[in-house]
Structure formats: structure tokens, C-alpha cells
Image (tube, rainbow, N blue to C red):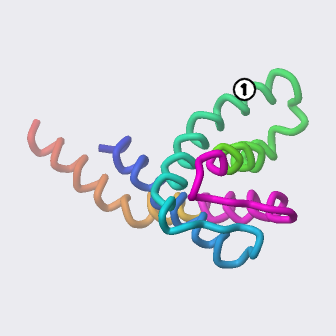
Amino acid sequence: MRFLLSLVSHVISAAAALLIANWILPQVTLRVSGFVVAVVVFAVAQSVLGPFIFNLARQYASAVLGGIGLVSTLVALWVATLFPDGLTITGLGWVLAPLVVWIATALGGWILMGLVFKRTLQKHDQGKKGAS
């Protein structure tokens, strides 16, 4: 249950973050026709690349560990732009979009998991205890 809610939280946060970046940054274009693909590709890329980039940085460049979230967001955005008719980032957007998306996904994940899904998890855990 916790994994499923975490996955849902991550996808919803990714969708919201990409929409926010599209809304406030003129260099970021998110097309309706490729929205779902862009969100899924970004979310999967960020989930897979985050730990990989963290381990590389920990091994070879420990001084940059604090910025790993931004780096993995940048790489995940780049991967998402490789799929046609979804996400396009140009110019200064490559500097600003990772920051905006990173902040939005972090806040979205915190809000969804910490506030919204917390009650669901508590009810689920209580149901398990009552059944045993």
C-alpha cells in the first residue's frame, strides 16, 4: 500500500511540476498530445536515475551530494524531451526548469505523502492490526 501511494504521489507531483514549469517558464513547452508520455517518462527517469546519480556522486564527487536532486531532475527532464510531441525545453529553460520542477516535486511529494496520504496509510495500518 505504501509503495502504491508513493508511486501515485510521485506521478501526481511530476505532472504538477511539469505543468507549473510550462506555466511560468516561456522556454518550457508541454503539449497536450504528449502530456501523459512526458509525465510518465520524467517520473520513471527521475526514479531510476536519482539513486544512480547519487551513488556516482557519492563515489566520485562527494562535494556535490547536496545538488543531486537538481542533477537527477535535469537529466530526467532531458530524457523526457527525447520523446516527441511532449516536452520541449529551450535556452534558459535548461537552467530554470530543473529548479522549478525540483522544488515543485519536492513540495508535492511532501504535501501528498505527509498530509493527504498519511490518513490513508494510518487507516490501512489500523485495518491490518484489527484483522490480526
- Above or below, comparing residue 38 to residue 71 in the picture: below
Extent of the magenta region? 80-106
The residue shown at (46%, 60%) is 12
Question: Is 89 colored magenta in this rendering?
Answer: yes
In this figure, which residue is indicated by the disc labeled 1? 55
As drawn, the residue found furthest toward the left would be: 131
The residue shown at (53%, 41%) is 44
Expressed as whole percent of the image width and height from the top left, the position of residue 28 reads: 71, 67
**Judging from the image, what secondary structure is the residue with disc 1 in?**
helix
Front-lying residue, 123 or 101:
101
Front-lying residue, 79 or 9:
79
The residue shown at (64%, 35%) is 49
Number of numbered discs visible in the structure rendering: 1
- Above or below, comparing residue 97 to residue 128 in the picture: below
Expressed as whole percent of the image width and height from the top left, the position of residue 78 reads: 71, 47
Expressed as whole percent of the image width and height from the top left, the position of residue 51 reads: 64, 32
The residue shown at (74%, 57%) is 98
- Above or below, comparing residue 21 to residue 118 in the picture: below
Expressed as whole percent of the image width and height from the top left, the position of residue 97 reads: 74, 62
